[in-house]
Image: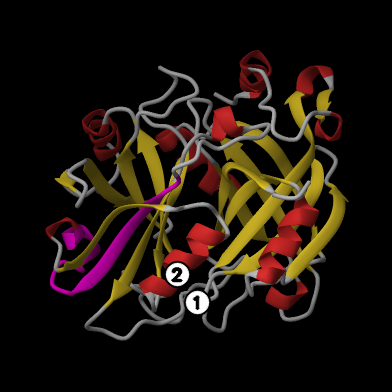
Amino acid sequence: MTEPLISGIQQIGIGNISVYDTWEWYKNNLGMDLPVFDEAAEAALMLPYTEGEPRSRHAILALNMMGGGGAEIWQYTSRTGQPAKFDIKLGDLGIYASKFKSPNVKKSHEVLSANNPVSAISKNPEGKDHFYLHDPFGNPIEIVESENWFGKGISHSGGVYGAVIGVSNIDKSKEFYKNILGFDKVVYDTQGKFDDFSYLKADGNEFRRVLLRHSKERVGPFSKLLGAGEIELVQALDQDANKIFQDRMWGDLGYIHLCFDIVGMDALREKCKNQGCAFTVDSGDFDMGEAAGHFAYIEDPDGALIEFVETHKVPILKKINWYLDLKKRPAGKSLPRWMLKAMGLSRVK
């Protein structure tokens, strides 16, 4: 394979101190009720980001069968996950917020506001409805409008649609997200003070913000389920920016990485090397029991961690021990909808 394929955003990693409490909230509030895996193991390959030592952890990857990426809910078990030593603010460098998609933002606002403090609904610079909230653990979440769906009627919202990422130089970061991840469509590029940032206590500050999408439809085994995605880059113009994970480990509290499902890891390794962002972690083949594949990491220009996963084995229906070997399938072909829907039979109420 000469060109790697990106199937979509597979998941966003969320470091926390209680994996089941965190999953319970995302399950009940955002419909993330399909556990792809629930595993306790040692993270032995992330040594560049765990102070050179293997670390024990417990992780759950949960999906929403309406479509979109998942949430990898990640807890250290060999140590206590650490918060930032400062109050994280919009414009700080790294993954600041997750984006979850909704077919009806007003309905999502109604459902979520019943049990959570949320912002008012406002218009983003594209003119679309959106709003913000924090999960109970302090992580910002943006609910955004989308018309891209795999299933309907299961929840008021779908899964992960993207992320808000703080950067120090938007023009440089735009090239990275375009050339490596295919986000080549600039939806807006605007500068100023923004009323819709009021809930984030940032409406009095000046920012440049750029919303990126991909012009080419995603392809690959899980592309129909994961769907389209977007990245919003935010650069603070009138305040200093801290690195969100400064002096902390990957896996500590907050958004630890943004992960893309890919096909063609060898081709991607070469592409990233040629673009000046060589893999910092390269797992080789792994087998976690319930899932198997190959993962790797790179850093964006400000050090935010981007993960790539090439899936080799995935559970379709655990109750009957039905697992799919993806190495035997054509690289760019999506799994049939009936097979993807069969994964939903493992949803947890």
Which portion, as a residue range, is magenta? 197-214
Q: Nearer the viewer, residue 33 or 79?
A: 33
Q: Amino acid at mark 1?
A: Asp
Residue at 21% x, 41% y: name it.
Answer: 128
Q: Nearer the viewer, residue 334 or 81?
A: 334
Residue 197 position, x and y percent, is: 20, 60
Please indicate whether residue 178 sits to the left or right of residue 112 in the image. right
Q: Secondary structure at mark 2?
A: helix
Residue 203 shows which numbered tag?
A: none
Between the C-alphas of marks 2 and 1, the distance is 8 Å
Which numbered marker is on residue 173?
2
Q: Which residue type carries mark 2?
A: Ser
Q: Is residue 103 above or below residue 22?
A: above
Q: Is residue 209 visible?
A: yes
The outermost residue toward the front is 2
Rendering coords of residue 198 (x, y %)? 16, 61
> Is there a contact, CB below 8 Å, between mark 2 and mark 1?
yes
Quadrant of res 137: bottom left
Query: Which residue is at a point 15% across and 66% down the rendered structure image?
Result: 203
Using the image, determine if residue 7 lies above or below residue 278: above
